[in-house]
């Protein structure tokens, strides 16, 4: 896919993993917050990667601990995927 700049926020144990692992050569840490009381550790990373199904799958594989901050189009794509997944369980949730 077309190269895009992606910004992600990870929380909890996943934040620690994102701080220690390099998923792409362009990856860089933008911000990092330690845990405070009930608030989980957070990290924001940015990387320039190919857009497409592989990127969405990568992000979804870290759910629910990763949030897309940018670009907005990718954020909406991930929101939509989570919504479709939730619909698969609506009948279970209604019980």
Image: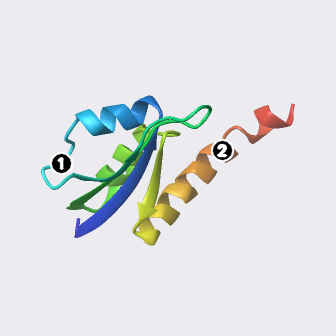
- Which quarter shows the C terminus? top right
Q: Residue at x 77, y 32 (%)?
A: 92
As measured in the structure, the alpha-carbon distance from the residue carrying label 1 to the one carrying label 2 is 30 Å
Q: Is residue 76 left or right of residue 55?
A: right
Of residue 31 and residue 90, the one placed in the foreground of this image is 31
The quarter of the displayed image where residue 46 is located: bottom left
Of residue 26 and residue 37, the one placed in the foreground of this image is 37
For the question of whether residue 66 can be seen, the reply is yes
Q: In this view, does 44 lie above or below 62?
A: below
Secondary element at tag 2: helix
- Res 86 label: 2
Q: Is residue 95 left or right of residue 36?
A: right
Q: Is residue 85 left or right of residue 41?
A: right
Please name which of the two marks, 1 or 2, marks the residue nearer to the observer: 1
Q: Residue at x 40, y 69 (%)?
A: 71
For the question of whether residue 44 can be seen, the reply is no
Around disc 1, counting alpha carbons within 10 Å, would you say few (fewer than 14), some (14 to 19), or many (20 or more)?
Answer: few
Secondary element at tag 1: loop
Residue 27 position within the rendered picture, expressed as x and y whole percent measured from the top left: 21, 52
Residue 36 position within the rendered picture, expressed as x and y whole percent measured from the top left: 54, 35
Q: Which residue is drawn at 46% across and 37% down?
A: 41
Around disc 2, counting alpha carbons within 10 Å, would you say few (fewer than 14), some (14 to 19), or many (20 or more)?
Answer: few
Residue 58 position within the rendered picture, expressed as x and y whole percent measured from the top left: 34, 44
Find the residue positioned furthest to the right: 95
Find the residue positioned furthest to the left: 25
- Res 24 label: 1
Of residue 29 and residue 93, the one placed in the foreground of this image is 29
């Amino acid at each position: 896919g077309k190269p895009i700049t992606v910004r992600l926020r990870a929380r909890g144990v996943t934040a620690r993993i994102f701080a220690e692992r390099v998923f792409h050569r362009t990856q860089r840490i933008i911000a990092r917050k330690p845990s405070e009381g009930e608030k989980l550790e957070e990290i924001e990373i940015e990387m320039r990667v190919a857009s497409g199904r592989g990127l969405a799958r990568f992000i979804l594989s870290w759910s629910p601990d990763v949030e897309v901050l940018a670009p907005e189009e990718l954020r909406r794509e991930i929101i939509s995927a989570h919504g479709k997944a939730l619909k698969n369980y609506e009948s279970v949730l209604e019980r």
